[in-house]
C-alpha cells in the first residue's frame, strides 16, 4: 500500500513540478538552516563531557555584591585546600600568568638554541590538576607538577619544541620561559581529543612561581579583594556531597578573609558547575544558552515558514486531488487511509527536501559563519547523530506540514467530488486558513525586516557617532616591557618611530581613549582638608602628545607636562568627572589634589571635553588622565598621514624598528578605528545573522506566494479571459489579482509592528547612546515587503494578464 | 438484496431546499438487472449514491441484505461498500496518476488482498475486458471506451455482489457503449446484481426491469423479462 502511495505521489509531483519544486525548495532551505543550527548547538553542548565524575566538578568563583560573577582571589585556593571538607580533589591554576611569553629551548653541541614567540595555552598548575582532568601519560607523571621548575606538555607541544624526539627522551630536557625561568620537562601527555574549555597544553609547576620570589611580579599582591579571572580553582566533590554545603564552607572562608575590608569589594565564594562554564558568558563562557536558544527559535521559525508554504500549496491544490480521493473512497478507502496517504506524500517531500538540504548546508554554514565555532567543520554534517536528527526533523516537518492538509483532503465526500463539479474554494474554510497562514508568514518576515533595519541603523549610528576624538589613520602597537622614561627600550622606540616619514605624531599611553572593558579604580580627592573617596574612576596614563594625536579638546587649564622627576604628577579630568566633583567651571577644579591610580600625588592641571571611554553601551565614564611617570605595558599610538596608500610602508618601517629592539617579540599592531569597530562585534554578528534570517524568511515566503499566485492565476484563467474579452486592461487584471495581497500585507503589518517595536526597543535598551525608532523604519519594511510580494505576483500574473483570452476560453 | 422504503433526501443550501428523493420505495432482488430512468434532475444519481452507501438518506429505511444501513456511520458504510459494491461512472473516474493495472488493483488493496493474488485477479479481469495489452498505460493514453472498460474491470475485480452504474455509456459512442452493456450483461448472467442509471432506452433494454422516476419519486415500473 505504501508503495502505491509513493507511486501516486511521485507521479503527482511529476505532473505538478512547479508547485512540488517550490515545496521542496522551501522545506530544504528551512531544513538546512535547522541542520546548521543543530550542528552549532550540538557542538556547544559537547564540551567537557569527558571528565570522570564531571557532575561533581565545580569551579570556585567570586560572586560580587552587585550580583555579577567574577574570577578568584589568590587567597582562595590554598584556603579551600586547607579548610573545606567534602572535597575529593582541588586544583589551583593560573591562566594568564604568562603574557607575551617567549620560550627558549637551549641548544647543545648538535642543535642550536631555539626561540618561540607564539606559545598558547600555557598555564601554571599544581599536580592535582590531573586528578580532575585526567590525561594519558606518555612519559613521566603528575608528580612533576608537585616540584619546583617542572614542565608538563602535550605530545603536540613536545613535537613542536623537541622535533624528532620520542616522549621518553624528552624527560629531563630544559625549557626556559621569558629568559628567566628555567624548567625541566617532567612529563608528556597525550593531546585531548575531546572538546573542552580546559584546553591547556603546557603546564608549569605552580610552585615554580608561588614558592619563589617570582610570586609578586607574576601574580600580584595576594589579597582577598584582589580578584583575577586568570586564577582558577577547580574542585571535585566527594560522592554524595551537597554542593550547597561546600558553598557555605567557602563563603565562611571568604567572610573570615574579608573582615575589615571595604564592603564594595566583599564578594563571597560560589561554585560554578562544570557544565555551566561553557555557557556563562558573564565569566569566560563561549556562548550563552540564550544565544543558542535564539538560534533554535530562528531555525523553528524558518521551518514553520516552509511548513506554511507546504500547507498553503497543498490545500490549494487539494481541488486537483478531489477526484482521486473520491475514487479511492468509493473503492474502499477509509478516512484514515487517506490521511496516511498524504502523510506519506509529505514524508516523501520532506525526505527529498532533506537530501537537498544536505547539499545546501555548506552555503548555510557560510551564512552562519559568524556563529560557527572554529572547531566546527563542514565534515561534521555527514556524521553520526546528524542523521538521527534529520530523521526526527523529517518526521516533525511531515507532521507539521502534512497533518492539516491531509485532514482537509480526507474530509472530501466522494459524492461531491465525483459530480465533476469544480469545488468552490473561494470562500471555503481552507481558503481562509490559507490567508491566515500567509499573513503569519508576512508577520515573521516583517519582524525580521524591521529588526534588520533597526540594528543596521544603530550600528551605523555607533560607528559614525562623534566620539570626541579622532580614530582614523591611527595605529597602536603594544610594547612588551615596562617603560620607565625615555632611556628604556620603548622610549628609544618612540624616538625612532618619530623619524619614519609618513608618521605625523607619536604618543605613549596605557590605554587608548576608548577601551574595551574597564580600567578603573579608586582615587582619593583632598578637598577643603577632607579626604573623599571616588570609586570606579577610569585611568589613562598619557604623555603630552596624547590630546593632540587623538584630537581631544581641552576646555580649561593646560595640557599635562611629563616630568618623571617631579613628586606631584599632572593630571587631567574630563567633564563628567568635573561634574562628579561638584564643579561647573574647569577653573574650580584646577589645582585640586588627587591620590590613587598610578600616582602617589597628582594635581589637576586641566579639563578635557568628554570623549567616549567605553563602548557606546555605556555612558561616558569619569576619567583621570595622568601624566606619564611610570607605565605598565604601554601602547604606542601613531598618527599616520591621511593617505591610506602610505600606511603599508609606514607600518612595515615600524615593524623593522620594533624588531631591531625586540628581536624575540611578536610585532602586533591595530588600527584604532578597527578596534572600535570590534567593540561591536556581537551587534554586527547579530545584524549579519538577522540579515540572513530575514533574507531566508522572505525567500521562503515568496516561494510560497509564487506557488499560490500561479495556482490562483491558473484557476482564474477563464474568468480573466472573459474579463479581457469584455475589455479589461492588463493593469486592471493585475490589480484584480493583487488587491487581496495588499490587504494581507496590511494586516500583517498591523500585527508585526508592535512585536517588532517591542523587540527593537529591548535590544536598543542595551545602549547608552541609541537611535530613535522612527516610524519610517516600519513603513519602509512594510513597503519593502509589499514591493517584493508584488514583484512575485507580477512575475506570474503578467503572463496570465497578457495571455490571449481566446486560448483560455477554448480550452474548456 | 435491496429494500428501500419511504426514502427521502433533501439538499439544503442557503436559499433553497431541493427534495431530491421523496418517499421512494422499491426492491431489487439478488441477481436482478435494474435500469433507472427519468428526466435530468429527478434524483437518479442521488438514489444511486445512497444505494452505494456513498451518501445517507434523511429519512426512510434501507435494508441491504437484510441489514438496516440507513443510519450507518461513515466507517461502517466504507466497510460495507468495500466488501459488497462496485461502481461504474459516466466520466470513468480513473486516477490519472495510476496505470491501468494500478487503477484496477486499488479496490483489492483497500480490501487487504495479498500482492500475488492481486496480480492474478487484476490480470484475469483485464483479460476479460480485453485491455491486457494496455495494462501499463495511464488513463489519459486510452480512448473513452477503453477507459470505461478499465472502470468496469475495477468495479468487478473485488467480485462485488452489487454493481451500481451511473450512465456508464453516457460518454461513449454507440459501439463502445454496446460493448460495455454486453459486459454488464455478462456479469449479470454470472450472478451479479446490477442497478444502472441511463438516459438511453436502448441501453435500458438490456435490463430486466425499468424503474421510471419523476421528482424523486417512482412513477412506473416496466418489467421487461
Ligand atoms: N449537493 C447537492 N446540493 C444541492 N442540491 C443537489 C445536490 N446534488 C443534487 N442536488 C439536486 O438534487 C436533485 C437531484 O439530483 P441528481 O443528481 O440526483 O439528478 P439526476 O437525476 O442524476 O440528474 P441527471 O440526469 O442530470 O444526472 C437535482 O435537483 C439537483 O439539483
Ligand atoms: Mg445523474
Image (tube, coloured by chain):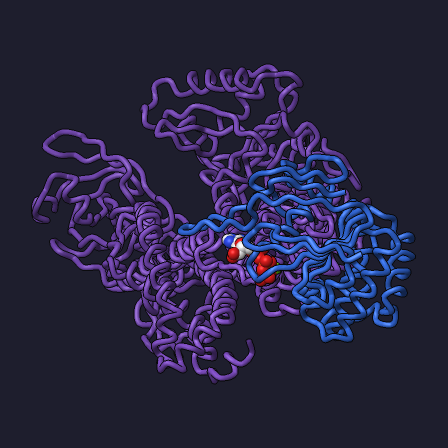
Q: Nearer the viewer, residue A478 or A610?
A: A610
Residue B86 locus on image (x, y percent): 76, 53
Quadrant in the picture for residue A518: top left
Q: Nearer the viewer, residue A75 or A60?
A: A60
Residue plotted at (63% across, 57% down): A115
Residue A779 locus on image (x, y percent): 28, 61
Q: Judge left or right: residue A376 versus residue A682.
A: right
Residue plotted at (47% across, 73% down): A652
**Residue A52 drawn above or below residue A593:** above
Residue A90 in view, yes or no:
yes
Q: Nearer the viewer, residue A608 or B5?
A: B5
Chain that is blue in the image: B
Quadrant in the picture for residue A451: bottom left
Residue plotted at (41% across, 50% down): B14
Q: Judge left or right: residue A275 versus residue A636.
A: right
Residue A345 locus on image (x, y percent): 67, 55
Chain that is purple in the image: A
Residue A754 locus on image (x, y percent): 31, 48
**Residue A33 drawn above or below residue A233:** below
Which quadrant: the C terminus of chain A?
Answer: bottom right
Q: Nearer the viewer, residue A771 or B198?
A: B198
Residue plotted at (8% across, 45% down): A584
Quadrant in the picture for residue A93: top right
Amino acid at each position: 500500500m505504501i508503495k502505491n502511495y509513493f507511486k501516486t505521489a511521485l507521479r503527482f509531483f511529476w505532473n505538478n513540478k512547479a508547485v512540488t519544486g517550490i515545496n521542496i525548495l522551501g522545506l530544504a532551505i528551512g531544513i538546512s538552516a535547522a541542520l546548521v543550527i543543530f550542528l552549532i548547538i550540538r557542538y556547544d553542548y559537547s564540551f567537557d563531557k569527558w571528565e570522570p565524575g564531571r557532575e561533581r566538578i565545580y569551579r570556585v568563583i567570586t560572586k560580587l555584591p552587585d550580583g555579577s560573577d567574577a574570577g578568584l582571589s589568590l587567597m582562595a585556593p590554598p584556603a579551600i585546600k586547607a579548610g573545606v571538607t567534602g572535597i575529593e580533589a582541588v586544583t589551583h591554576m593560573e591562566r594568564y600568568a604568562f603574557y607575551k611569553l617567549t620560550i627558549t629551548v637551549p641548544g647543545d653541541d648538535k642543535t642550536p638554541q631555539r626561540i618561540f614567540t607564539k606559545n598558547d595555552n600555557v598555564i601554571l598548575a599544581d599536580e592535582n590538576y590531573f586528578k580532575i582532568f585526567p590525561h594519558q601519560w606518555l612519559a613521566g607523571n603528575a608528580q612533576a607538577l608537585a616540584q619546583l621548575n617542572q614542565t608538563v606538555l602535550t605530545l603536540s607541544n613536545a613535537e613542536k619544541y623537541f622535533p624528532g624526539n620520542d616522549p621518553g627522551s624528552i624527560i629531563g630536557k630544559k625549557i626556559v620561559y621569558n629568559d628567566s625561568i628555567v624548567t625541566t620537562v617532567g612529563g608528556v601527555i597525550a593531546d585531548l581529543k575531546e572538546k573542552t574549555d580546559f584546553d591547556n597544553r603546557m603546564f608549569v609547576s605552580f610552585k615554580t612561581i608561588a614558592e619563589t620570589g617570582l610570586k609578586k611580579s607574576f601574580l600580584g599582591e595576594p589579597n582577598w579583594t584582589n580578584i583575577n579571572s586568570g586564577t582558577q580553582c577547580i574542585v571535585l566533590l566527594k560522592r554524595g556531597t551537597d554542593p550547597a554545603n561546600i558553598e557555605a564552607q567557602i563563603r565562611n572562608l571568604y567572610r573570615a578573609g574579608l573582615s575589615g575590608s571595604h564592603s564594595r569589594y566583599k564578594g563571597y565564594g560560589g561554585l560554578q558547575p562544570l557544565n555551566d562554564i561553557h555557557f556563562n558568558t558573564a565569566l569566560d563562557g563561549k556562548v550563552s544558552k540564550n544565544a543558542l536558544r535564539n538560534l533554535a527559535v530562528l531555525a523553528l521559525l524558518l521551518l514553520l515558514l516552509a511548513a506554511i508554504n507546504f500547507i498553503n500549496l497543498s490545500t490549494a491544490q487539494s481541488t486537483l486531488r478531489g477526484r482521486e480521493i473520491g475514487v479511492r473512497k468509493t473503492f474502499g478507502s477509509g478516512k484514515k487511509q487517506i490521511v496516511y496517504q498524504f502523510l506519506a506524500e509529505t514524508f516523501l517531500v520532506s525526505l527529498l527536501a532533506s537530501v537537498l538540504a544536505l547539499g545546501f548546508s555548506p552555503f548555510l554554514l557560510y551564512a552562519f559563519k559568524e556563529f560557527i565555532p572554529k572547531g566546527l567543520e563542514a565534515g561534521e554534517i555527514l556524521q553520526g547523530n546528524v542523521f538521527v536528527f534529520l530523521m526526527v526533523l523529517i518526521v516533525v516537518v511531515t507532521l507539521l506540514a502534512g497533518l492539516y492538509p491531509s485532514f482537509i483532503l480526507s474530509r472530501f465526500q466522494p459524492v461531491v467530488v465525483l459530480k465533476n463539479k469544480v469545488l468552490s474554494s473561494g470562500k471555503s474554510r481552507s481558503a481562509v486558513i490559507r490567508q491566515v497562514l500567509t499573513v503569519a508568514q508576512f508577520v515573521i518576515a516583517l519582524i525580521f525586516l524591521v529588526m534588520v533595519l533597526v540594528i543596521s541603523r544603530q550600528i551605523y549610528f555607533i560607528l559614525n557617532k562623534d566620539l570626541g576624538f579622532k580614530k582614523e589613520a591611527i595605529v597602536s602597537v603594544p610594547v612588551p616591557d615596562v617603560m620607565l622614561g625615555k632611556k628604556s627600550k620603548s622610549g628609544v622606540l618612540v624616538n625612532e618611530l618619530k623619524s619614519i616619514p609618513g608618521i605625523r605624531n607619536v604618543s605613549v599611553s596605557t590605554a587608548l581613549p576608548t577601551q574595551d572593558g574597564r580600567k578603573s579604580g579608586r582615587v582619593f580627592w583632598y578637598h577643603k582638608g577632607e579626604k573623599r573617596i571616588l570609586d570606579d574612576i577610569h585611568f589613562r596614563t598619557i604623555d603630552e602628545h596624547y590630546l593632540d594625536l587623538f584630537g581631544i579638546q581641552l576646555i580649561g587649564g593646560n595640557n599635562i607636562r611629563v616630568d618623571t622627576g617631579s613628586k606631584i604628577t599632572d593630571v587631567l579630568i574630563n567633564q563628567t568627572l568635573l561634574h562628579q566633583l561638584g564643579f561647573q567651571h574647569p577653573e574650580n577644579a584646577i589645582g585640586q589634589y588627587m591620590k590613587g591610580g598610578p600616582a602617589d600625588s597628582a594635581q589637576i592641571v586641566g579639563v578635557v571635553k568628554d570623549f567616549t571611554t567605553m563602548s557606546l553601551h555605556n555612558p561616558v565614564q569619569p576619567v583621570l588622565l595622568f601624566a606619564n611617570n611610570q607605565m605598565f605595558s604601554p601602547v604606542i599610538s601613531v598618527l599616520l598621514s591621511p593617505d591610506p596608500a602610505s600606511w603599508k610602508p609606514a607600518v612595515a618601517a615600524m615593524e623593522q624598528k620594533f624588531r631591531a629592539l625586540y628581536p624575540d617579540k611578536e610585532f602586533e599592531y591595530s588600527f584604532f578605528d578597527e578596534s572600535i569597530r570590534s567593540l561591536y562585534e556581537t551587534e554586527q554578528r547579530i545584524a549579519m545573522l538577522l540579515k540572513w534570517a530575514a533574507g531566508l524568511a522572505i525567500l521562503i515566503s515568496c516561494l510560497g506566494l509564487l506557488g499560490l499566485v500561479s495556482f490562483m492565476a491558473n484557476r482564474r484563467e477563464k474568468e480573466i479571459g472573459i474579463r479581457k474579452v469584455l475589455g479589461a486592461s492588463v493593469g486592471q487584471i493585475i490589480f484584480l489579482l493583487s488587491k487581496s495581497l495588499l490587504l494581507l500585507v496590511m494586516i500583517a503589518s498591523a500585527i508585526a509592528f508592535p512585536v517588532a517595536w517591542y523587540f527593537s526597543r529591548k535590544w536598543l535598551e542595551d545602549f547608552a547612546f541609541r537611535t530613535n525608532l522612527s516610524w519610517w523604519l516600519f513603513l519602509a519594511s512594510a513597503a519593502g515587503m509589499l514591493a517584493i510580494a508584488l514583484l512575485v505576483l507580477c512575475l506570474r500574473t503578467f503572463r496570465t494578464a497578457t495571455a490571449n483570452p481566446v486560448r483560455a476560453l477554448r480550452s474548456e | 438484496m435491496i429494500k428501500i422504503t419511504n426514502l427521502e433526501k433533501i439538499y439544503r443550501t442557503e436559499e433553497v431546499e431541493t427534495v431530491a428523493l421523496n418517499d421512494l420505495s422499491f426492491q431489487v432482488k439478488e441477481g436482478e438487472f435494474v435500469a433507472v430512468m427519468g428526466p435530468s434532475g429527478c434524483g437518479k444519481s442521488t438514489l444511486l449514491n445512497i444505494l452505494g452507501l456513498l451518501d445517507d438518506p434523511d429519512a426512510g429505511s434501507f435494508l441491504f441484505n437484510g441489514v438496516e444501513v440507513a443510519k450507518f456511520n461513515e466507517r461502517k458504510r466504507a466497510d460495507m461498500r468495500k466488501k459488497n459494491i462496485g461502481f461504474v461512472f459516466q466520466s470513468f473516474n480513473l486516477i490519472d496518476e495510476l496505470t491501468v493495472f494500478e487503477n484496477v488493483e486499488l479496490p483489492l488493496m483497500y480490501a487487504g488482498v495479498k500482492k500475488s493474488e492481486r496480480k492474478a485477479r487484476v490480470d484475469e479481469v483485464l483479460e476479460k475486458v480485453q485491455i491486457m495489452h494496455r495494462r501499463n498505460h495511464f488513463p489519459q493514453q486510452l480512448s473513452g471506451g477503453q477507459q470505461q472498460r478499465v472502470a468496469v474491470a475495477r468495479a468487478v475485480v473485488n467480485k462485488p455482489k452489487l454493481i451500481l452504474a451511473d450512465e456508464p455509456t453516457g460518454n461513449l459512442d454507440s459501439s463502445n457503449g454496446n460493448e460495455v452493456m454486453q459486459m454488464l450483461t455478462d456479469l449479470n448472467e454470472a450472478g451479479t446484481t446490477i442497478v444502472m442509471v441511463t438516459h438511453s432506452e436502448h441501453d435500458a433494454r438490456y435490463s430486466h426491469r425499468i424503474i421510471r422516476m419523476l421528482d424523486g419519486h417512482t412513477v412506473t415500473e416496466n418489467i421487461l423479462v
